[in-house]
Image: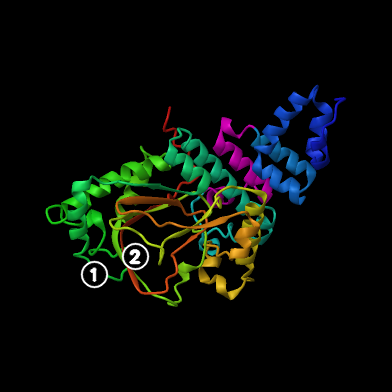
């Protein structure tokens, strides 16, 4: 191709080949767009991981992945792990986030993770999530692009007062679900009719946010995990949840319905754009995966770090282009967050109690295409 553009100075070797083979600039841009959309190949190329012939094989598979995501993922895992053992595919395709809880010892294999196994899992789970949520609404767009979305005036106004009354029946303090105590699906319908009704409203929205409206597994997770939460947040309480962190390697959601206004003290905080798979975000996750496997990381990151819930420092977030935001919201607001992205419980200078109906959906099958819109 005769005409060169300034962009050529930033070409990779793969770009150079495409540039020479293209008949014109427009054709090259189409070729380059396809390659740019192959995030795992780009990750490998940029870091010069694996042999060139291995990267070329992976690119040829990744660029055609939409024809059969499962087959593409399986073939790339075999290249990365240099094995066709079924256990490698089994572990890599699971929703297991803890490196050392994998009975097959695949996820904690240092060499395979040095070759990019953990990043491969992040990227393909992201591909599947993008496909599952391809029918865009404003809130799905916000969740996909920014990592968090809010829905104000969520419940009918005449339900707010009775909902507050039902929530007050629960003790202050517990931040987790307790069987036989605060799980909404276990509550007596005659005693807690409004909370039971709210659960159904939230499930409809939450499942659509992740493209799993027809997934009984996801619905069961919602029903098992939705509970009344009355958090007592105090200054300097050494709460590890007040350190920014990513819960899991794939898109998963947590959500809170707030019956009262949430003010700045102790408000939920989120790292906007931390769900975008930029070079900086992927490189950071790669580094943390190896440090977790080696057990070689700073003590402030805590035990959760080695379990796959990576803790992140504010300066690291800034380097990745992630912006910290407090979610102060009006009463009757539903907040939904993708907890692959960085988030934390907010700090406070005084004791505060935050009432919420809190739930989560973290599926066991993040690599399964739902085909919700066919």
Compared with 313, 91 (above or below) is above
Q: Is residue 39 left or right of residue 338?
A: right
Pinpoint residue 301: horizontal percent, then vertical percent.
56, 70
Residue furthest top as drawn: 23
**Front of the two marks 2 and 1:** 1
Q: Secondary structure at mark 2?
A: loop
Residue 26 position by quadrant: top right
Q: Which mark is residue 176?
A: 2
Q: Is residue 312 left or right of residue 27?
A: left
Q: Which residue is mark 1?
A: 171
Res 130 seen here: yes
Which label number is shown at residue 314? none
Q: Could you say whether the residue bearing mark 1 is in a helix, strand or loop?
A: loop
325 with respect to 228 (left or right): right
Quadrant holding the C terminus: top left
Of residues 326 and 163, which is closer to you in this image? Answer: 326
């Amino acid at each position: 191709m005769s005409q060169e553009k300034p962009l050529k100075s930033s070409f990779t070797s793969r770009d150079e080949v495409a540039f020479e083979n293209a008949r014109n600039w427009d054709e090259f841009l189409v070729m380059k767009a396809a390659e740019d959309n192959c995030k795992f190949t780009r990750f490998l190329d940029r870091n010069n991981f694996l042999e060139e012939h291995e990267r070329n094989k992976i690119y040829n598979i990744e660029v055609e992945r939409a024809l059969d995501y499962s087959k593409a993922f399986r073939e790339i895992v075999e290249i990365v792990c240099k094995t066709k053992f079924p256990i490698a595919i089994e572990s890599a395709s699971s929703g297991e986030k803890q490196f050392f809880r994998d009975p097959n010892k695949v996820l904690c294999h240092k060499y395979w993770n040095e070759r990019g196994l953990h990043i491969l899992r992040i990227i393909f789970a992201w591909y599947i999530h993008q496909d599952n949520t391809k029918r865009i609404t404003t809130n799905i767009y916000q969740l996909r692009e920014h990592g968090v979305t809010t829905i104000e005036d969520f419940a009918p106004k005449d339900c707010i007062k009775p909902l507050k009354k039902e929530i007050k029946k629960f003790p202050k303090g517990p931040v987790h679900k307790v069987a036989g105590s605060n799980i909404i699906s276990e509550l007596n319908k005659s005693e807690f009719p409004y909370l039971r009704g709210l659960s159904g409203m939230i499930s409809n929205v939450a499942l659509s946010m992740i493209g799993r409206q027809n997934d009984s597994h996801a619905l069961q997770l919602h029903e098992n995990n939705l509970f009344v939460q009355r958090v007592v947040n105090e200054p300097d309480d050494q709460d590890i949840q007040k350190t920014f962190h990513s819960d899991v390697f794939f898109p998963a959601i947590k959500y809170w319905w707030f019956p009262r206004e949430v003010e700045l003290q102790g408000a939920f905080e989120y790292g906007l754009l931390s769900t975008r798979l930029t070079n900086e975000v992927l490189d950071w996750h790669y580094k943390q995966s190896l440090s977790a496997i080696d057990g070689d990381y700073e003590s402030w990151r805590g035990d959760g770090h080695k379990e796959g819930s990576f803790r992140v420092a504010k300066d690291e977030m800034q380097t990745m282009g992630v912006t910290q935001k407090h979610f102060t919201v009006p009463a009757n607001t539903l907040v939904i967050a993708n907890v692959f992205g960085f988030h934390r419980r907010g700090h406070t200078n005084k004791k505060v109690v935050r009432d919420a109906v809190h739930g989560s959906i973290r599926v066991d099958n993040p690599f399964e295409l739902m085909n919700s819109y066919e």
